[in-house]
Structure formats: C-alpha cells, structure tokens
C-alpha cells in the first residue's frame, strides 16, 4: 500500500482536460510544498513533469500544471494528446523516516 | 546533455549482494544529490535513499536501513548503490536520478538496471 493515494486510472478524449489527484496527510503533501509529478511510458524511465507543487521544468509542455489544496495535490493535463497516454506518479517529501513517498500511480488512457 | 548511464542487468542468488553503478555526464557531479528509486515489475516507484556526491553524506529509507549502501567515486563521476541480503522481493528495476529541485524532484533518471533475485 502506497503512502500517497492516486486513482488507479483516468481517461479522456483528445483535446479534453483531465485531473489526477494525489492524497496524503499533513505529514507529507499537506505539510510541505515539495510535491512532484512524473510521467512514465511503458519500458521507460520516469520523467519529471512538475516539481515544488506547480513548477514546470524547462521543456515540459505548459499543458501540464500542478496545484495543491490541503492534503491533496493535483496534476491537470489540458488539451489531451495521444502521447500523454502513460502512467503518472506523484511524490512528496515526508517528515517520517522515509523522507520521500510516492503514490501508487495512475494510468492515463487517451480514448 | 545531462545524462546518467547505469550498469547492466544482474542476476543474483538469494542472500547475495548487488552493486549498481550510475555514471554522470554533462554537469558537475558533485553539485547535485543522487537518489535511488526502484520499481518491481508492474508496480509503483519506491524511494530507497539519497547521497550527496560532494560530502558523501547519505540518507536511507527506513525499509532499507542496514541493507543498502550508497557511495561514489568523484574521479569518475560515478555513484553506486549496493543492496545486500537479497531476497526474491528485491527483484526490480533500480534507477538512479539526479535531484532537480531544492528538496525533491528528480531529473534526469538513468535508464534503469534490472536486478533479478532467483535461486
């Protein structure tokens, strides 16, 4: 069981927007602005899409955005494209001895 | 470009140890922490620990305390992760990743190293 809770799957049609949630506690997501999101295509290494809740690394499309409210962080993808189909993982710093926790991952299907 | 290249796949017997390397290029190796994350087949990501290549300081997830050791050789810009007392549940792809943000955010990642533990 992962420390952060994500929906197992989400789907959307090309051009639509989707949001993936990531729920933790006040010891991780709610307590720190150190949430990051990763995209992983099958057989590939993860790729950083969002860090520090809402910052985008250079080269990441502005269709990807992040936010946080209380103990829940969210990743929104607007203008869905076929290449967005992948697994998405959230991660947060935690005050526990684990230091870093991941969500269980969300499979995004572009219909 | 900034790149991390890992060593090749390994097959180990239960109880053995494995040492995975991660060679950095395209940036100053000692300026960014290296983290290790593993992923069992069909499963999610699991953080194992971090290392500061400049000082050699490390921090390990409690789950791996006593079994994992992270080291580096600055002369060849290479980080290492050694996991001992291997069991079948340790079968996974092991990734190294550079710290991107101040505290969190890993980018780039190595290509991954498959470690198979089987008798």
Image (tube, coloured by chain):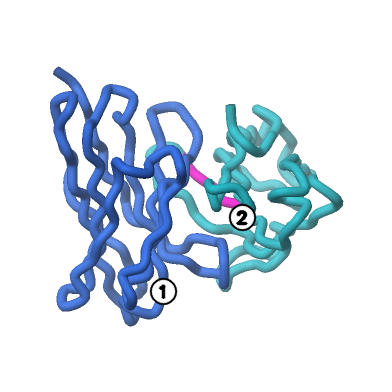
Chain colours: A cyan, B blue
User: Which residue shows up at 37% across the image and 70% down it?
Assistant: B52
Q: Quadrant of residue B42?
A: top left
Mark 2: few/some/many CA within 10 Å (<14, 14-19, 20+): many
Instruction: Please provide percent x and percent y for residue A34.
Output: 66, 61
- Would you say residue A39 sits in the magenta stretch? yes
**Which is nearer the eye, A33 or A22?**
A33
| Badge 2: chain ID | A
On the image, numbered disc 1 is attached to which residue?
Answer: B32
Q: Quadrant of residue A31?
A: bottom right
| Badge 1: chain ID | B
Q: Which residues are magenta?
A: A36-41
Between marks 2 and 1 in the image, the one whose residue lies nearer the viewer = 2
Q: Is residue A35 left or right of residue B30?
A: right
- Mark sitting on residue A93: 2
Q: In the rendered view of the protein, which quadrant contains the C terminus of chain B? A: top left
- Residue sticking out furthest to the right: A69
Instruction: Please provide percent x and percent y for residue B9.
Output: 18, 40
Name the secondary structure under disc 2. Answer: strand
- Residue sticking out furthest to the top: B119
Q: Does any portion of residue A101 appear in the rendered image?
A: yes
Name the secondary structure under disc 1. Answer: loop
- Would you say residue A18 sits in the magenta stretch? no
User: Which residue shows up at 23% across the image and 48% down it?
Assistant: B82
- Mark sitting on residue A54: none
The secondary structure that most of the magenta stretch takes on is strand
Instruction: Please provide percent x and percent y for residue A7.
Output: 70, 31
């Amino acid at each position: 069981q992962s420390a952060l809770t994500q929906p197992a799957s989400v789907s959307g049609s090309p051009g639509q927007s989707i949001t993936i949630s990531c729920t933790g506690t006040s010891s991780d997501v709610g307590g720190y602005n150190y949430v990051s999101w990763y995209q992983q295509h099958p057989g590939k290494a993860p790729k950083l899409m969002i860090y520090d809740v809402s910052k985008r690394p250079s080269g990441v499309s502005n269709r990807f955005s992040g936010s946080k409210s209380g103990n829940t962080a969210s990743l929104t993808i607007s203008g869905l494209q076929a290449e967005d189909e992948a697994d998405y993982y959230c991660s947060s710093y935690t005050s526990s001895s684990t230091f870093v926790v991941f969500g269980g991952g969300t499979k995004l299907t572009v219909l | 470009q900034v790149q991390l290249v890992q060593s090749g796949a390994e097959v180990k017997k239960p109880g053995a140890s494995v040492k995975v390397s991660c060679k950095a290029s395209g940036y100053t190796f000692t300026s960014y922490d290296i983290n290790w994350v593993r992923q069992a087949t069909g499963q999610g990501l699991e953080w194992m620990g971090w290392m500061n290549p400049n000082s050699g300081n490390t921090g390990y997830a409690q789950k791996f305390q006593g079994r994992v050791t992270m080291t580096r050789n600055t002369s060849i810009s290479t980080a290492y992760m050694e996991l001992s007392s291997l069991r079948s549940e340790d079968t996974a792809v092991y990734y190294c990743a550079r710290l991107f943000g101040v505290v969190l955010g890993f980018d780039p990642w190595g290509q991954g190293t498959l470690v198979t533990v089987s008798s």
